[in-house]
Image (cartoon, rainbow, N blue to C red):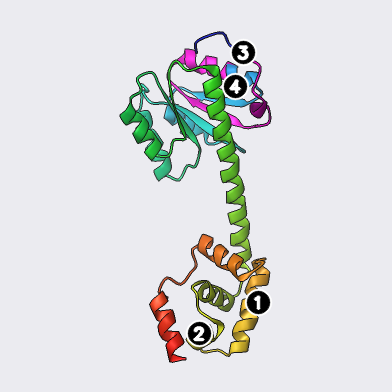
Amino acid sequence: MRGVRDNTPAPETRTIAGTVIVVDDDPGIRASLDSLFRSVDLCVATFPDPSEFLAAGLPDGDCCLLLDVRLKAADGLTFQASLVQTGINVPVIIMTGHGDISMAVKGMRAGAIDFLTKPFSDEAVLSAVSDALKISRSQREEGLQRAEMQARYEQLSAREREVMALVASGLMNKQVAARLKISLITVKIYRANAMKKMQASSLADLVRQAEELGIRDESISRYHIEEDTRRR
């Protein structure tokens, strides 16, 4: 890093806890970043190559990855792309001493949230890490909410799931009844049960949850709905 280091953390950095993972084959860079992040009370894990990072696994809680592009044992951008493909969800900040526009574009397209060219200032890297940890927190909260939603969905009976999927696809109660060959009152009961178990505050909320869970009946198009309505 260049310039005189100011170890006084920015206000927003103080409020964000988490772990910064550094993958860089330069021991001096790793040591410098380790010292910087620890000075603002962040946890740090440093690795000389991606294989050691993968062997250690992601830490619990919020985290982000500060990844060098040019590594002795691997190409950083290729490794970043592999993380996405294997479902390892961690905000990535790309850093390089040989940056150019094409590298930045490739890294951003693969999901990097920032791109730092060495030598970068302490302020620049702390700001990038602060943003990355906020994203990590948001992703983790969304994951927990989705897991809770999935758990609620698992409590629905098979018929309640069918009704929920059809209602979320845009069918009216009478259309659902005709499709499932059950009475209108039965559809209303299943629909009410589904909304209660899913803790849906409204029909729109139930539809939103169905969208997020990917359970809408894709075989039902607007054309089919209009045809059903005309027939009835």
Q: Confirm or deny contact between disc 3 and disc 1 (CB under 8 A).
A: no
Whether 8 is among the magenta residues is yes
Query: Could you tell me the amino acid type at mark 3?
Result: Asp
* SS at badge 1: helix
Query: Could you tell me the amino acid type at mark 1?
Result: Ala
Is residue 165 placed above or below 151 in the rendered structure? below
Q: Could you say where residue 213 lies in the image, as x and y percent from the top left? A: 52, 62
Is residue 193 placed above or below 96 in the rendered structure? below
Q: Could you say where residue 88 lies in the image, as x and y percent from the top left? A: 47, 42
- Determine the residue positioned at 58% across, 50% down: 143
Number of the front mark, 2 or 1: 2
* SS at badge 4: helix
Q: Residues within 10 Å of mark 4 (few under 14, many from 20)?
A: many
Whether 192 is among the magenta residues is no
Using residue 147 as the reference point, say whether residue 68 is left or right of it: left
Residue tagged 4 = 37
**Residue 12 image label:** none
Is tag 2's residue or tag 1's residue first in the polypeptide sequence? 2
- Determine the residue positioned at 48% across, 16% down: 29
Number of the front mark, 4 or 3: 3
**Quarter occupied by residue 13:** top right
Find the magenta span and give its range: 6-35
Residue tagged 3 = 6
Is tag 2's residue or tag 3's residue first in the polypeptide sequence? 3
